[in-house]
Image (cartoon, rainbow, N blue to C red):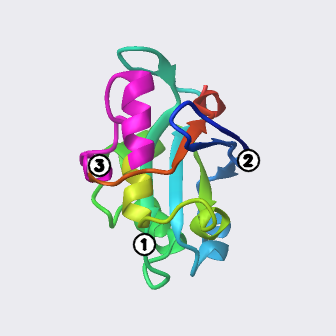
């Protein structure tokens, strides 16, 4: 993460993603108890969004340790989350994921994990024109908060 102050006096923090992990149980299980955001993307399929192409399929979150990133990802992996899009993409090719542990952002993000997810989804919409193809909820709650941090998100990671 790199940061600077923008014209509104907000700190701008650049978000870089960790190395991708193959979307399979052995890589998911160690994430039990971790909360934050996770990103599921394809190996080779570039989704044509209105403004640009991306391999990103889904942005998700875990707000509680009892429903951690690990348990949320296992739900998607096993199909229990009922996200038909993710299940069907996985039938066609291997998927990958990466995540952001909310604890890494605690010094600069004073809102809920749900608000962070909303921020990322709305930022994706700004760059690509629509929600990630397998997301089906809106992210407008964040607009009710006064933000002191802006994120510059490295969406090129998913190209």
Which of the labelled discs sits on residue 101, or is there none? none
Please name whichever residue, 56 or 28, is drawn nearer the observer in this view of the structure: 56
**If you read the primary sequence from the N terminus, does the residue marked by circle 2 or circle 3 appear first?**
2
Q: Secondary structure at mark 2?
A: loop
Rendered image: mark on residue 84: 3
Mark nearest the camera among 1 and 2 is 2
| Residue drawn at the location 25% of the way across and 46% of the way down | 140
Contact flag, marks 3 and 1 (Cβ < 8 Å): no
Task: Name the side, left or right, on which 115 lies relative to 18.
Answer: left
Tell me what residue is drawn at x 53 percent, y 40 percent.
41
Residue 100 x, y percent position in the rendering: 61, 58
Question: Mark 2 or mark 1, which is nearer the start of the sequence?
Answer: 2
Residue 10 in the image: above or below residue 30: above
Instruction: State left or right for residue 75 relative to residue 15.
Output: left
Q: Quadrant of residue 72?
A: bottom left
Residue that carries the numbered disc 1 in the rendered image = 63
On whether residue 130 falls in the magenta region, the answer is yes
Mark 1 neighbour class, 10 Å CA radius: few under 14, some 14 to 19, many 20 or more: some
Where's the C terminus, which quadrant? top right
**What is the residue that sits farthest to the bottom in this orientation?**
66
Image x and y of residue 47, in percent: 44, 23
Per the image, the residue denoted by label 2 is 1
Query: Mark 2 against mark 3, which lies toward the viewer?
Result: 2
- The answer to whether 42 appears left or right of 141 in the picture is right
The answer to whether one can see residue 91 in this image is no
Q: Residue 31 sits in which quadrant?
A: bottom right
Q: Earlier in the sequence, mark 3 or mark 1?
A: 1
Magenta region:
119-142
């Amino acid at each position: 993460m790199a940061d600077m102050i923008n014209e509104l006096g907000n700190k701008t923090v650049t978000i870089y993603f960790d190395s991708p992990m193959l979307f399979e149980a052995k890589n998911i299980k160690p994430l039990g108890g971790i909360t934050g955001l996770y990103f599921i993307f394809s190996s080779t399929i570039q989704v044509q969004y209105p403004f640009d192409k991306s391999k990103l399929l889904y942005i998700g979150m875990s707000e509680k340790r009892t429903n951690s990133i690990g348990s949320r990802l296992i739900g998607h992996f096993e199909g229990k989350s009922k996200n038909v899009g993710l299940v069907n993409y996985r039938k066609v090719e291997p998927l990958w994921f990466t995540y952001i542990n909310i604890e890494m952002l605690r010094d600069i993000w004073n809102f809920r994990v749900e608000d962070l997810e909303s921020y990322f989804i709305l930022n994706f919409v700004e760059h690509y024109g629509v929600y990630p193809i397998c997301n089906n909820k809106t992210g407008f709650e964040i607009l009710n908060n006064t933000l002191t941090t802006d994120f510059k998100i490295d969406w090129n990671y998913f190209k």
